[in-house]
Image (cartoon, grey):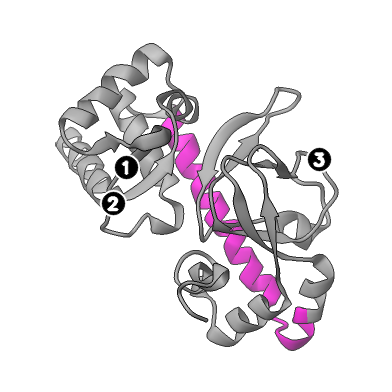
Amino acid sequence: MSRGEPGAIFHRRGWLAAQPEPVRNAWMEISEFRSVSRGDRLYSLGDPPGGVYGIAEGFADVMTASGYEPPVLAHIARPGWWVGEAAAVTGSPRRVEIRARTDLRVCYVSLQRLEELEEVFPIIWRLLAQMTVLHLDNALMYAASLLKGDARTKLVSTLVRLAGPEMLYDADISIPCSQQDLGEMSGLSRNSIGPAFRALERDGLIRRGSYGSITYNPIQLSKMMEAGLSRGSR
């Protein structure tokens, strides 16, 4: 598959890229690509179980809710990110809402196709559990950033988390995200996030781009956060 094809990203980043090549190739053979317009939903909270989605192009909002509270923005997913395995594996309702932040190109593998894949690769359900672990790691980072640290630490932790499959890449990445969105995902008020955001801008660690995007290097932010934690433990 050439780098210019829609599914090429999945061979380089994210959950599928970490799977054995025969599984990756078979997965892509049974998948179908769909276009999703900005603002449309892949699925909503409580929807019946279905297949698994991967983002090939664009960005998606991950909305979560607790009890009867309205959904809140918890994450912005980027190319290489997969979701939907929990409902597919357990047959339970959808636990999050996925909404297109930009126009999307997604890869979809239906439940029926997953069951067909199991006949060739019985290990597929264990591999899908790895996807659940990635989501758990993200959820734990989300909880930690809400509960601990000052505004700057919360903001940096959130930006690192938003890097998703590119979290370990020592290069600039961009995400279409406003300061208000960051505040919501970081558990910060407008008054709190403003000074922290501007301080990171002054330090050259983040910069605003066109159309409301934010550009940063997740490795540089991680090192800054680790250095701060190290000084705090002395």
Q: Separation of disc 2 and disc 1 at Cα?
A: 6 Å
User: Which marked residue is nearer to the observer: mark 3 or mark 1?
Assistant: 1
Left or right of 81 in this view: 39: right
Q: Is residue 125 magenta?
A: yes
**128 or 111, nearer to the observer:** 111
Disc number at residue 172? Answer: 2
Amino acid type at mark 3 = Gly
Q: Residue at x 56, y 68 (%)?
A: 6
Amino acid type at mark 2 = Asp
Left or right of 124 in this view: 138: left
Disc number at residue 188? Answer: none
Q: Residue at x 61, y 83 (%)?
A: 25
The quarter holding residue 91 reads: bottom right
Q: Residue at x 54, y 77 (%)?
A: 19
Depicted 203 relative to depicted 3: above or below: above
The quarter holding residue 166 reads: bottom left
Left or right of 118 in this view: 172: left
Quickly name the residue at label 1. Answer: 215
Quickly name the residue at label 3. Answer: 46
Could you classify mark 2 by the number of other residues whose Cα lies within 10 Å: few (under 14), some (14-19), or many (20 or more)? few
Q: Position of residue 156 (x, y in %)?
A: 32, 36
> What range is drawn magenta here?
117-146
Q: Position of residue 45 (x, y in %)?
A: 76, 38
Left or right of 119 in this view: 27: left
Count of residue discs: 3
